[in-house]
Image (tube, helix red, strand yellow):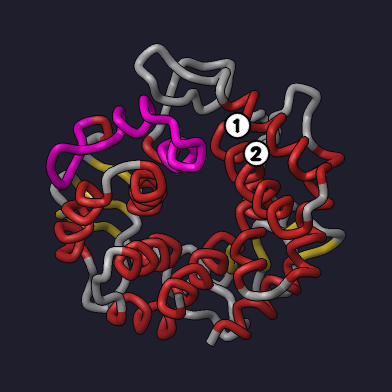
Amino acid sequence: MTERAIAWLKRAQRDGAVAATIGPDGSRGKPYVEVTGYLIPTLLNLGEEQMARACAEYLLPIQRSNGAFPGLDGLSRTFDTSACFEGLMAAYNHFSDVRFLEAGTWARNWLMKQVRSDGSLHLFPSIDETRVYTCRADGLLKRDRGLKYWSPDGDWHPAWGTRERTHYIAYALEGLWRGGPHDVVVRVLEASWQAIGPDGLMPFWIHEGWTGGEGTCLTATAQMAMLYRWAGMDAERLMAGLEKARHPSGGFPVSAGEETCVSWAAKFYLDARLAVLQ
């Protein structure tokens, strides 16, 4: 089942960069640095070495002089830079090319300078704001202060707000799993089960206590399926929902029924499939 998603990503890649989107007419969106970065370990785990190497090579010349990487808006962002750090280090570990190590280290050094007084990471340097998804970067960096800031005592954290995108909370849970106590994540995952819709999909928005879900999000569904598998929980309902909502092109849109497909949904679908195989 992974072949169609890989084929879709191959269509999304050009000159190493992976596009953010492919429209219903086949048009490619802007190159997405974040996805190009964190797709590298996924591709390597699937044996797609040529694609992974092309991604890593693309990142080298676009890295900024301070070590950061840009988001789609052109700003140097911590989340996007952490995704590139992840990819570059995976590329170095696989290909033993010191250029990837140097670039990854450079990115990490910049990230470690973007810490707020409360221990969380800035979204980007020019504003003193953070968001729950930065916890994924904390997990990659093994930053205890950031992980502690975002770690809930129960199944919800006040810092997540009363309403948040399920996609963003899934990023945080991935970060906590990578760098923090797994029992915290399992507790949240068990509570999240009630948010799954009758179509097997996670909501786009979720309210405090994992209630009041709004819309659907295929990326969040894939992320949570991956996390359920990591935690030894049953993810088949989510995977079935994803297969049913998959676009005929082989890709996955943001929400069920949409025509434009996004590369980050394909990445996490593949990670969910890999979690079943590993």
Give the residue pinned by disc 1: 77
Residue 67 placed where, x, y %? Answer: 73, 28
Quarter-of-image position of residue 164: top left
Q: Report helix, strand or loop for mark 2.
A: loop
Instruction: In the displayed orientation, state which residue is furthest to the top.
Output: 117
Residue 266 placed where, x, y %? Answer: 56, 69
Question: Callout 2, which amino acid?
Answer: Gly
Reply above or below: 247 against 143.
below
Using the numbered discs, state the Cα–Cα distance from disc 1 to disc 2 in whole angstroms: 6 Å
Residue 99 placed where, x, y %? Answer: 83, 42
Q: Are marks 1 and 2 in contact (CB under 8 Å)?
A: yes
Q: Which mark is residue 186?
A: none
Q: Residue at x 20, y 52 (%)?
A: 188
Q: Nearer the viewer, residue 257 or 120?
A: 120
Specify which label sits upstream in the sequence, 1 or 2. Answer: 2
Q: Residue at x 54, y 80 (%)?
A: 247
Residue 73 magenta-drawn? no
Q: Is residue 253 left or right of residue 158?
A: right
Q: Is residue 247 left or right of residue 162?
A: right
Give the residue pinned by disc 2: 71
Quarter-of-image position of residue 39: bottom right
- Magenta-highlighted residues: 135-158
Q: Is residue 33 left or right of residue 154?
A: right
Residue 150 magenta-drawn? yes
Q: Is residue 15 left or right of residue 115?
A: right
| Quadrant placement of the C terminus | bottom left
Question: Callout 1, which amino acid?
Answer: Arg
- Decide: few, some or many residues near mark 1? Use Cα within 10 Å; few <14, some 14-19, many ≥20: many
